[in-house]
Image (cartoon, helix red, strand yellow):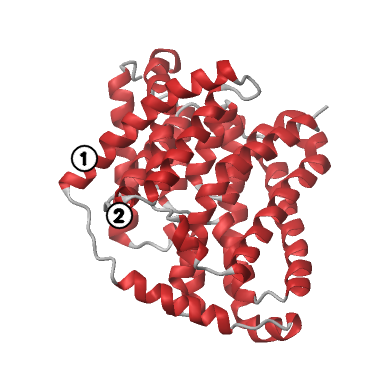
């Protein structure tokens, strides 16, 4: 049994490295269904279940790294989101994206009210983390977890839903591509603007050939960790001055603002922010899962059903909005997956329609990074208020 904190962290990071290497080098179909980031969580949970490390002895290392790494990840992640480029998507696609976001948020609140008697009144915690993920990505999930101080058990349930329900939703949306002509005829959607925007963004993407270097990676890692440190101090000060939000929430919101500001400066063009944010994300995911045992997931079927209820509500409301607002299937489907799947899957779905549309999927997913954390926290507080 591992009792040394450094050894515990080293084992987790090496395990994550092995799984990512297998995904990148082997191209196994297995990873198309269960991506490496989910495998990291599941393997770490398995090792925890087998008591590979002593929970009490390794807790100081866990506590010292989890939140600082999370805040650094949020900053690095948002450096990729230049709001000026997002605006170029045009009103129709932005309306489609936010329609998906709002219907997902409604889905969480309604599903919680329907299922809290089965999965427990405290289930709002796990659902809040999942909401952060389904509005942005895995990074938003751990940011919401840090902001609302959600336990590892609840995070385990959130990840189970995120893996199973999300995977089936991706399959459904990929299948629905063939229905695009009939769907667009039904909604009376005009795709002329979409084609113009996608072509413009594709040309712009070709001009960005920057690659990460030792210097840029070191700069981004050092800056992200420094911002994390400063953000925690600022969060504590804001909490004292404005106690309506706790320290962690203020910290996340402050760092989110810094990330968005940095994205529109020359810092946003420094290559490597995606690699640095992913490095920190996998580290945090491994740390979180290392405190959750698989034996604690006895109620997983009820949680999985809750996830499908959320998706069903989202789908029905999106159909109504697409018909009312004359939104085409591409915009509606990619907006949905930009929220629920993030940068990992939205570009894939966009590319399934047309290679020139990939930049649209990427920008929509990056916008999800911006709203995922604050909106996930907001939905969490709403569900908490409804818990009684």
Q: Is residue 91 left or right of residue 381?
A: left
Q: Which mark is residue 269?
A: 2
Q: Tell me the distance, in whole angstroms, between the alpha carbons under discs 2 and 1.
A: 15 Å
Quadrant of residue 188 within the rendered picture: bottom right
Where does residue 125 sit, x and y in percent of width and height? 66, 32
* Residue at horizontal 69 percent and vertical 40 percent from the top: 379
Q: Residue 218: image x %, image y %?
A: 21, 40
**Is 24 situated above or below 93?**
above
Nearer-the-camera pick, 241 or 56: 241
**Residue lying at 47% horizontally and 43% vertically, measured from the top left:** 139
Residue 302 lies, in percent from the top left, at: 73, 42
Q: Nearer the viewer, residue 354 or 246?
A: 246
Q: Secondary structure at mark 1?
A: helix
Mark 2–mark 1 CB contact (< 8 Å): no
Secondary structure of residue under mark 2: helix
Quick check: 52 left or right of 252?
Answer: left
Callout 2 environment at 10 Å: few (<14), some (14 to 19), or many (20+)? some
Total count of labels: 2
Task: Report the residue at 33% width, 36% height from top.
Answer: 224
Q: Quarter of the image for the C terminus: give it.
A: top right
Is residue 58 rendered to the left or right of residue 147? Answer: left
Q: Which mark is residue 218?
A: 1
Q: Position of residue 182 (x, y in %)?
A: 70, 86
């Amino acid at each position: 049994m591992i009792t040394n904190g450094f050894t515990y962290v080293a084992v987790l990071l090496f395990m994550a490295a092995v799984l990512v290497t297998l995904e990148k080098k082997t191209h196994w179909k297995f990873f198309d269904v269960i991506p490496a980031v989910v495998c990291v969580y599941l393997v770490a949970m398995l090792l925890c279940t087998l008591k590979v490390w002593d929970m009490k002895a390794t807790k100081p290392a866990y506590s010292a790294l989890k939140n600082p790494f999370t805040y650094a990840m949020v900053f690095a992640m948002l450096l990729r989101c230049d709001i000026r480029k997002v605006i170029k998507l045009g009103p129709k696609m932005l309306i489609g994206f936010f329609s998906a976001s709002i219907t997902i948020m409604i889905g969480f609140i309604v599903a919680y009210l329907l299922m809290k008697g089965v999965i427990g009144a405290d289930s709002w915690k796990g659902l809040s983390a999942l909401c952060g993920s389904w509005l942005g990505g895995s990074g938003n999930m751990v940011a919401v977890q840090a902001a609302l101080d959600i336990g590892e058990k609840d995070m385990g349930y959130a990840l189970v839903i995120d893996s199973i329900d999300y995977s089936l939703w991706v399959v459904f949306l990929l299948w629905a591509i063939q229905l695009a002509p009939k769907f667009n005829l039904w909604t009376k959607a005009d795709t002329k603007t979409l084609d113009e925007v996608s072509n413009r963004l594709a040309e712009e993407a070709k001009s960005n050939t920057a690659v990460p270097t030792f210097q840029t990676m070191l700069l981004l890692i050092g800056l992200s960790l420094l911002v994390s440190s400063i953000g925690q101090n600022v969060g504590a000060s804001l909490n004292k001055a404005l106690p309506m939000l706790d320290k962690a929430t203020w910290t996340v919101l402050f760092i989110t603002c810094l990330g968005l500001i940095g994205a529109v400066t020359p810092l946003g063009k420094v290559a490597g922010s995606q690699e640095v944010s992913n490095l920190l994300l996998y580290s945090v995911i491994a740390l979180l899962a290392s405190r959750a045992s698989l034996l604690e997931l006895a109620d997983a079927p009820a949680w999985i059903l809750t996830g499908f209820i959320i998706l069903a509500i989202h789908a029905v409301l999106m159909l109504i909005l697409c018909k009312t607002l004359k939104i085409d299937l591409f915009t509606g489907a990619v907006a949905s997956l930009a929220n629920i799947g993030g940068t990992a899957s939205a570009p894939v779905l966009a590319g399934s329609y047309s290679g020139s549309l990939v930049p649209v999927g990427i920008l929509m997913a990056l916008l999800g990074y911006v709203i995922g954390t604050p909106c996930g926290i907001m939905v969490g507080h709403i569900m908490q208020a409804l818990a009684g």
